[in-house]
Amino acid sequence: MTHTSSTETLLLEIALPVPLRRCFDYLPPADTNLTELQPGVLVRVPFGRQELIGVLIKVKTESEQNLDKLRPALAIIDPRPALDNELLDLCLWAADYYQCAPGEALQTALPVLLRQGEPAQLRGEPVFRLTTEGKGLPDGALKRSPKQAALLAALQTHHQLSRNDLELFEIPRTIAKNLIDKGLVRIDEIVPSQAPHPALLLREPSLVLSEEQQAAFAQITYDSFKTYLLDGATGSGKTEIYLQAIEETLKKGKQALVLVPEIGLTPQTLQRFQRRFNLPIVALHSGLNDRERLDAWLQARDGIARIIIGTRSALFTPLKEPGILIIDEEHDGSFKQQDGFRYSARDLAAVRAHRLGIPLILGSATPSLETLHNAIQGRYHYLRLKARAGNARPPEIQLLDVRGEILHEGFAQASIDAIGDTLGKGNQVLVFLNRRGYAPTLECHDCGWLANCNHCDARMTVHQTPRHLHCHHCDHQRGIPKRCPNCNSSRIQPIGQGTERSEVVLQQLFPAHKVIRVDRDSTRNKDGMQKLLADVHSSEPCILVGTQMLAKGHHFADVTLVVIIDADAGLFSTDFRGAERMGQLLLQVAGRAGREEKHGRVMLQSHHTDHPLVQTLVQQGYHALADLILHERQITQLPPYRHLALIRAESKQAIAAVDFLQTARKMAEQLQAPHPLFSYLGPLPAMMEKRGDRFRYQLQINSAQRKPLQQLLSELALQLEASPLAKRVRWSIDVDPQEMG
Ligand code: ADP
Ligand code: ZN
Ligand code: ZN
């Protein structure tokens, strides 16, 4: 029933950060000028006994709620909308599509400080400038301190430098402080504003594109929506095309938004952009504090920042003059959020670009099958780079059959020889093993006891630095027992290989060389990765050993050998994307070898060298593998040929989760009568049935068409939300799920 307010009182419809799939109505706060109130404004409201900050969706006269019960909002935080219509609509569309509460989706788009009621106002930023004395200094005055002289020279050319600029010029802040102490430099606080465009857009000239790059680049148009798949091997020059497409965009007075995987956002990437462009660039990554994040966001909104580089949630950055969206490594799993608002930044980028009428470039050496399928079908414009840029040749992949071989702590003799050989020639080696810790588990040699996690269906990983057992699924940790808890034998030993163990082994085998381990444990500290990689970039012969953190985005010019310890991990996965991911990961790792003049070689250790997927990948490459998997997906009716949604439920008692999903299935079958284009699978236990003491189940819904699935899910979500069974479980809907576990 709708209630119309009698005297045409205006009501505020507000999205609140609560997990309910609806908005809430409020009376306007006292003495508010309603005519000026625009959607996107933040409003403080009472909610139960708390106060929340929500987003105004619209001003209206009718309510589904009883008018007498409506409470007045407390305050309008800022009459200027925090979200413009474009972003507001995108978030609401996405909330609808991903079956998420509108308030939760909007949360993702708003910087934390705005959600807490901070004004959306840019603050002053310190800049370094020369004092009158500094300006009057004769040439060569600071001869004895080259770094101080360098800063002085930079200030003479650029008039002022921000903290970022200092980093770019590699001038330590202490040098600036020295000059301040000498009275030559002062710090001014300036509020950034949109500067007129400099006459020179570029700091350094762009490269002359190869014929192939030019052919791809020439097809990009800037004044309308089109999605491009830029498909080219690692090192084929995709980034150079992004840079030149951005240049075109900047020339038109527009902004560029670039998304990269979390791990790929290294200073290397950022510096490459900063070296090229003479316009303000902001980077939105996990290393920023809340204030820095808000500043970057505001600079994008106000058009001060012309290039915005960020990870997944940067998709929701407001842009004053949007011109192009670019997603690098579009296949990367990090673009899909795995909890709460389960959106895909890649897929939403297409929606956003479409609504803005601007181009979207998806780049990858190993495109996701969804994207590849869209390109093959002609929905995306397919741009392909086959050669490597510059002089680099593609690496040779050599398959090592390790069946029946005596492995030295996981390494085949041929691998060890190749590593020694490479180091001997003064080159670097990358050893890839996608398992952190010392060993996957601990085993009793006498009774077969294994170190299981008490809270999960999983084994505990052995770690040596510091020594402990660690469950990577629920984070449970305990000491390493001296004796078997089952038979009291002292013969308990770590089983299998992890990165820590490989590091130890390699260091024993090659004591004269540095072994650098890169995984989540070794890079935990801020700047951890940069510090570790500093050695690698110094070009000394060394061995890098690490997990997939090494696979993405880095450029190791002196690595000429990549050894992959276990190529088989994804082959027998119960997730239908296992093989696709395996192919992507192996090729991304392989792509680290021989990026410049040096020729690269990849050795792949496998127990399944004759498996058709392995054979296809090694002999014919990723695209042949992709064809093979696509064919399988078509036969088995899986994405990209079908659309999936996963309803997950977990609870302390398995029965509650199963009951909930059985009810969900019944409800769904009533909403959508049996139909050949619709199918259900489940409730079934998740791949890891118990995790963190909760039992996990799932129901898979598979549809040939997106629209009926969407309609079904919208109704189903509301019914489930209202169901009493829902109170006994944690449940969620995942639309276009990426992880099936
Ligand atoms: P990708 O992004 O596909 O990995 P990049 O754009 O990073 O490739 O290019 C790989 C290397 O080749 C980089 O060092 C880059 O500077 C260089 N490069 C790219 N395009 C050209 C070109 N047209 N001429 C010369 N060098 C190039
Ligand atoms: Zn035992
Ligand atoms: Zn556990």
Image: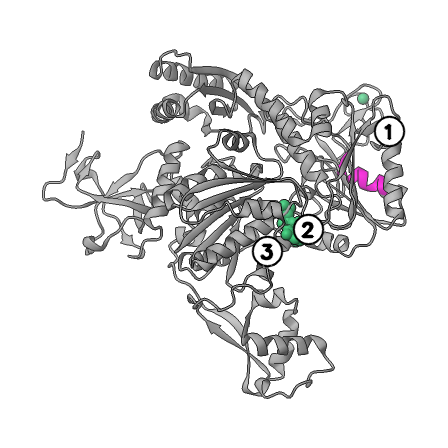
Give how far apart the Cα atoms at labels 1 and 3 are. Answer: 41 Å
Question: What type is the residue that disc 3 sits on?
Answer: Leu
Q: Where residue 146 appears, x then y in whole percent?
A: 71, 77
Around disc 3, counting alpha carbons within 10 Å, would you say few (fewer than 14), some (14 to 19), or many (20 or more)?
A: some
Q: From the viewer's perspective, is residue 670 above or below residue 267?
A: above
Q: Which residue is mark 3?
A: 270
Can I make out residue 199 in this image?
Answer: yes
Around disc 1, counting alpha carbons within 10 Å, would you say few (fewer than 14), some (14 to 19), or many (20 or more)?
A: few
> What segment carries the magenta color?
497-506
**Left or right, residue 122 beside residue 77:** right
Question: Under tag 3, what secondary structure?
Answer: helix
Around disc 2, counting alpha carbons within 10 Å, would you say few (fewer than 14), some (14 to 19), or many (20 or more)?
A: many
**Left or right, residue 105 beside residue 69:** right
Quarter location, residue 3: top left
Mark 1: C-beta under 8 Å from nearest atom of ligand 2: no
Q: Where residue 334 appears, x then y in whole percent?
A: 56, 39
Q: Where residue 383 appears, x then y in whole percent?
A: 55, 40
**Left or right, residue 576 beside residue 353:** right
Q: Which residue is mark 2?
A: 529
Q: Is residue 500 magenta?
A: yes
Give the camera-side residue of 389 and 45: 389
Give the camera-side residue of 450 and 703: 703
Q: Where residue 156 appears, x then y in whole percent?
A: 58, 79
Q: Is residue 573 magenta?
A: no
For discs 2 and 3, the disc positioned in front in the rendered view: 3
Q: Examine the residues drawn in magenta and state their main secondary structure.
A: helix
Question: What residue is shown at x 79% (from left), y 20% (from top)?
Answer: 448
Give how far apart the Cα atoms at labels 2 and 3 are. Answer: 15 Å
Of the numbered discs 2 and 1, the one sitting upstream in the chain is: 1
Residue 407: image tag: 1
